[in-house]
Amino acid sequence: MSASILVVSGSLRKGSFNSHLARQAVARAPHGVTARLSDAPRGLPYYDGDLDTDSPPSEVAAWRESIAQSSALLFVTPTYNHALPGGLKNALDWASRPFGAHCLIGKRVAVLGCSPGTSGSKQGVAYLRTILPFLGMTLVGEEVALPQIADKVNLETGWVNDDIDALLRETMRLLAE
Ligand SMILES: Cc1cc2nc3c(=O)[nH]c(=O)nc-3n(C[C@H](O)[C@H](O)[C@H](O)COP(=O)(O)O)c2cc1C
């Protein structure tokens, strides 16, 4: 499969810093590599084993198919109460079934996070990096948590500082390998 990267933000709000980084990552995919933004966490029902049949809800089927069509994923997420936002966790729960034969297995994956405060979303990033190998994914890149993000990006113009520009390019390059 030629490299195709699916980028997922853990934040749903319009003014999200993490979604901003997700969009900027897509824009920095290496030449010839397909990168797409997914808003799957927004549309999915809560995971329910009774709905997880051979004919799951259409949003679930589409989310799983978008992963199956990708060679790698990038998650960019805030931390909510020292853990993952519920929507992103729910999306992962749907993606992780059927057990042992799901769409995440064998995919390359990287995790970034940022916050306007001092933590940089460190807890959410660390938590996600802990569970992804358990789901059969191959982590690439380092643990990245970007604090005081409001000083480093501009949501209106799309600007990111030079360090973040380099980080996003390198992350997308690693995912495309
Ligand atoms: C429900 C909730 C819980 C949060 N918990 C934490 C937290 O545990 N640690 C932290 O540093 N920031 C926490 N924050 C602040 C987020 O880091 C901040 O709102 C951030 O901007 C969210 O990311 P976004 O800009 O991509 O939406 C929390 C925010 C919300 C809404």
Image (spheres, rainbow, N blue to C red):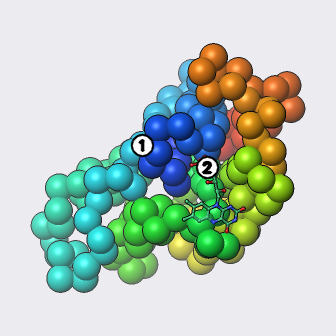
- Residue 30: x %, y % from top left: 65, 25
Label 2 neighbourhood size at 10 Å, few (<14), some (14-19), many (20+)? many
Q: Which numbered marker is on residue 50?
A: none
Which residue shows up at 35% across the image and 52% down it? Answer: 42
Residue appearing at x 81%, y 49% in the figure: 147
Residue 142 in picture, x, y percent from top left: 81, 55
- Mark 1 secondary-structure assignment: strand
Residue at left offset 71%, top offset 50%: 115
**Residue position marked by numbered label 1 in the rendering:** 38
State whether residue 134 appears in this view.
Answer: yes
Q: Name the residue under label 2.
A: 76
Q: How many labels does the image show?
A: 2
Give how far across and how far down residue 104 sits, in percent: 47, 62
Query: Which kind of residue does numbered mark 2 sit on?
Result: Val
Query: Is the CB of the residue bearing disc 2 within 8 angstroms of ligand 1?
Result: yes
Q: Which of 118 and 24 is in front in this view?
A: 118
Q: Does the closest atom of ligand 1 sit within 8 Å of the Cβ of label 1?
A: no
Image position of 83 with respect to 165: above or below: below
Q: How far apart are marks 2 and 1 (CA)?
A: 11 Å
Q: Return the x and y of residue 35 as percentages of the image width and height.
A: 51, 32
Closest to the observer: 7 or 44? 44
Q: Residues within 10 Å of mark 1 (few under 14, many from 20)?
A: some
Task: Report if residue 101 is visible in the image.
Answer: no
Residue at the location (59% across, 34% down)? 20
The residue type indicated by label 1 comes to Ser
Q: What element carries label 2?
A: strand
